[in-house]
Amino acid sequence: MEILRYPDRHEWSRLTARAMASQASQVAATVRSIMDDVASRGDEALREYELRFTGSSLSDFAVSDEEIERASSLLSPALRHAIESAAQNIADFHRAEIPSPVTVETQPGVICMQRPVAIERVGLYIPGGNSPLFSTVLMLAVPAVIAGCPYIELCTPAGSDGNIHLAILYAAKVAGVGRIFRTGGAQAIAAMTFGTESIPRVDKIFGPGNRYVMEAKQQATLHGCAIDMPAGPSEVLVIADSNANPTFVASDFLSQAEHGPDSQSILLTTSEKLLDILPGVIDEMLDALPRRDMMLHSLDHSRLILMHDDDEMMEFSNQYAPEHLILNHRDADRLCGNVRNAGSVFIGPWSPESAGDYASGTNHTLPTSGYARAYSGVNIDSFMKKITFQKLTADGIATLAPVVVAMAEAESLDAHALAAKVRTSAGNQILQ
Ligand SMILES: NC(=O)c1ccc[n+]([C@@H]2O[C@H](COP(=O)([O-])OP(=O)(O)OC[C@H]3O[C@@H](n4cnc5c(N)ncnc54)[C@H](O)[C@@H]3O)[C@@H](O)[C@H]2O)c1
Ligand SMILES: N[C@H](CO)Cc1c[nH]c[nH+]1
Ligand SMILES: [Zn+2]
């Protein structure tokens, strides 16, 4: 963990860079060869990659209805209840996001409309390398169902025994996923992009994953498949003042470090005292956590930084564009007004990021690696297209035609002009 005091601004570009950037071209090459292989050899290639990466020998990729039913009966009532309550909050929040149709008569007789229409075939990726993220099933499938997507498939890596975690299957059942396939990593993204004998191709792929999954999704876009956004290794930036409870801050800092070795946590504070105390609190907590060894990797590229004032902390945070921003600060509500780049923001001492990761209702599939500068996290809109419609009356085109004709002729597009002219009485006369 790097500890810095008042770093100079010219250091900020290094401090806001992500750890994985250095291996990007090697990851891209590995993923390209997996994508090509799955495109040409389909299921056979998938089987080989699953054996290599998860140790599972798969005969059938599709999960049967019986397996899903069995999962429901084997899962503890307490976990079933937790999944159902989280699903309820996620559904409530995402239902409120449903966009309304738009109709505007921009001038008499010219009626323009916009209608949200669900994407027909969506593919959900559920990470399963370091932990089976069944919470992600809810984050993707609940809004997909609310948006009205008619076909929803899900891919996730199986364990070495070929089984998918019971809670993933149960969450998929609660949310209403249509089909579930056992395959993960870049090969799963390739399968959903190109289609294989067992796994149908989709129009858009959703979901987070490690660097291979994130890269594969970006390559999928070169083959005509849309994606939600680049959502890679988790990251958090905590802004804390002298008021902040060091135990709260340390636990938030560590909660993202445990996602995987590429995760990154950053603390910004104006409090020397907090900066001095925190390493000890983090170490003590770390020693009690089962994922300590993996967390040490993410802490290797994590940072505690002392800054001059609130404005400087907000500026740094906006430059970093964190996936998650926690404002553990006495003026958290005021600082919120200055957030320009972040995936999701947690306001005040009582809003741990884990609340949003699981159950408060907001979506946890969020842009990482600085993409929060331009992308939103998954939301209802992600599962919809907005199609525009228009209907002009004879009077409407008559009054709009001069504008269309002037512009079309100035672009030297005379056929465009003609299509407007022939619909006006003057144009009709010209033709006769
Ligand atoms: N941004 C978000 O919204 C968000 C949400 C949840 C999780 N996450 C992130 O998702 C990630 C999950 O990663 P994970 O690894 O646990 O699961 P994963 O399912 O994303 O990846 C596991 C798969 O990666 C492939 N793989 C592993 N090593 C490989 C290699 N050397 N070459 C090619 N392929 C390889 C294998 O197929 C393996 O089954 C974490 O980084 C976590 O932080 C992000
Ligand atoms: N923090 C992750 C998003 O980066 C989501 C998650 C799932 N389970 C726990 N956390
Ligand atoms: Zn998390």
Image: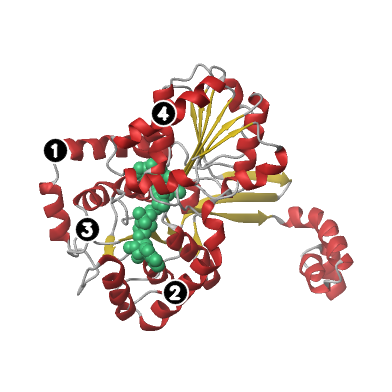
> Helix, strand or loop at disc 1?
helix
Amino acid at the residue labelled 1: Pro
Residue density around tag 1, few if under 14, some if 14–19, many if 20 or more, within 10 Å: few
Tag 3 residue: 164
Label located before the other in sequence (1 or 4): 1
In the image, which is nearer the foreground, mark 4 or mark 2?
4
Q: Disc 4 vs disc 3: Cβ atoms closer than 8 Å? A: no
Amino acid at the residue labelled 4: Gly
Is the image coloured rainbow, by chain, by secondary structure, or in one colour? secondary structure
In the image, which is nearer the foreground, mark 1 or mark 2?
2
> Helix, strand or loop at disc 2?
helix
Amino acid at the residue labelled 2: Met
Label located before the other in sequence (4 or 3): 3
Q: In the rendered view of the protein, which quadrant contains the C terminus?
A: bottom right
Q: Give the Cα distance between marks 2 and 3.
A: 23 Å
Q: Residue at x 31, y 78 (%)?
A: 43
How many marks the image carries: the answer is 4
Q: Is residue 421 above or below residue 74?
A: below
> Helix, strand or loop at disc 4?
helix
Q: Disc 2 vs disc 3: Cβ atoms closer than 8 Å? A: no
Q: Give the Cα distance between marks 4 and 3.
A: 38 Å
Tag 1 residue: 77
Tag 2 residue: 35
Tag 4 residue: 280
For this view, does 185 lie left or right of residue 108? left
Q: Give the Cα distance between marks 3 and 1.
A: 19 Å
Q: Is residue 159 above or below residue 13?
A: below
